[in-house]
């Protein structure tokens, strides 16, 4: 009987260890959640496209639910930086951030998304940095409603209305404790 129980005990112990390898693990006081970090699924403007100048709503959609108060964006050497509000807003789908900006006509823009690696999923995983590049044409969008429609949004997806300090070109949440 003992000879039969020992292989069963070993097999069940190995199964528990294998299952535990996929579960949350504590490492030096930090909880590490397995799985990939969030990635940018889509944006508005779409990468390397041309959009109307004036009011534009930047839209960044991640492939995982995100934390509303963990984000970072800033200047890129690849283009001009738009004049944006300080804080993006996470929409009710928990995956889409929107940011109200204004852009000049016939210009090339580039924005670093998550340069300080603060965009984070609800599981605490940091998103990879991403550069959004787009250009503008001579057509001008003057109203917020039209800018929302161009980004595939509606009036309930209104961005936050807090302006950043002029000339800073970088906005991000404070570093984690």
Image: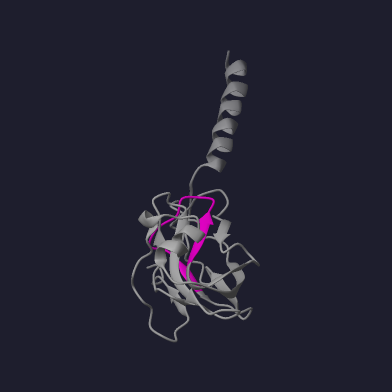
At a point 54% along the width and 55% down the height, the residue shown is 38
| Residue 36 included in the magenta stretch of the image | no
Q: Nearest the camera: 143 or 30?
A: 143
Q: Residue 112 at what x, y percent from top left?
A: 56, 72
Range drawn in magenta: 57-73
- The residue at the point 37 percent across, 61 percent down is 158
Name the residue: 41% across, 57% down: 67
> Which quadrant of the structure image shows residue 47?
bottom right
Query: Who is closer to the viewer here, 106 or 87?
Result: 106
View extreme (left): residue: 161
Whether residue 32 is visible, yes or no, is yes
Q: Which quadrant: the C terminus?
A: bottom left
Residue at the limit of the structure toward the right, as seen here: 48
Query: Colour scheme in the image?
Result: one colour
- In the image, taking residue 174 as reference, residue 80 lies left or right, namely right
Find residue 55 and report its horizontal and vertical position in percent. 46, 71
Residue 51 location, x and y as percent? 58, 68
Residue 28: tell me if it is visible.
Answer: no
Name, please, the residue furthest toward the bottom. 167
In the rendered structure, the answer to whether residue 16 lies left or right of residue 165 reads right
Q: Is residue 65 magenta?
A: yes
Specify the farthest residue to the front: 139
User: Which quadrant would the N terminus be assigned to in this image?
Assistant: top right
Taking the spot 47% from the left edge, 70% from the top edge, the residue there is 72
Q: How many marks?
A: 0
Residue 140, horizontal then vertical, whole percent: 51, 73
């Amino acid at each position: 009987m003992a000879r039969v129980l020992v292989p069963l005990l070993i097999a069940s112990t190995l199964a528990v260890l294998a299952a535990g390898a996929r579960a949350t693990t504590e490492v030096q006081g930090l909880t590490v959640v397995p799985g990939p970090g969030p990635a940018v699924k889509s944006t508005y403007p779409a990468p390397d496209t041309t959009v109307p100048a004036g009011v534009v709503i930047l839209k960044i959609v991640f492939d995982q639910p995100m934390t509303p108060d963990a984000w970072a964006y800033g200047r890129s050497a690849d283009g001009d930086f738009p004049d944006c509000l300080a804080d993006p807003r996470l929409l009710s789908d928990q995956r889409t951030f929107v940011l109200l900006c204004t852009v000049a006509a016939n210009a090339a823009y580039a924005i670093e998304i998550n340069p300080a690696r603060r965009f984070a999923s609800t599981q605490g995983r940091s998103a990879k940095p991403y550069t959004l590049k787009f250009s503008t044409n001579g057509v001008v969008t003057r109203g917020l409603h039209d800018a929302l429609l161009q980004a595939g949004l509606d009036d309930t997806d209104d961005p936050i209305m807090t302006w950043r300090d002029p000339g800073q070109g970088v906005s991000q949440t404070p570093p984690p404790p």
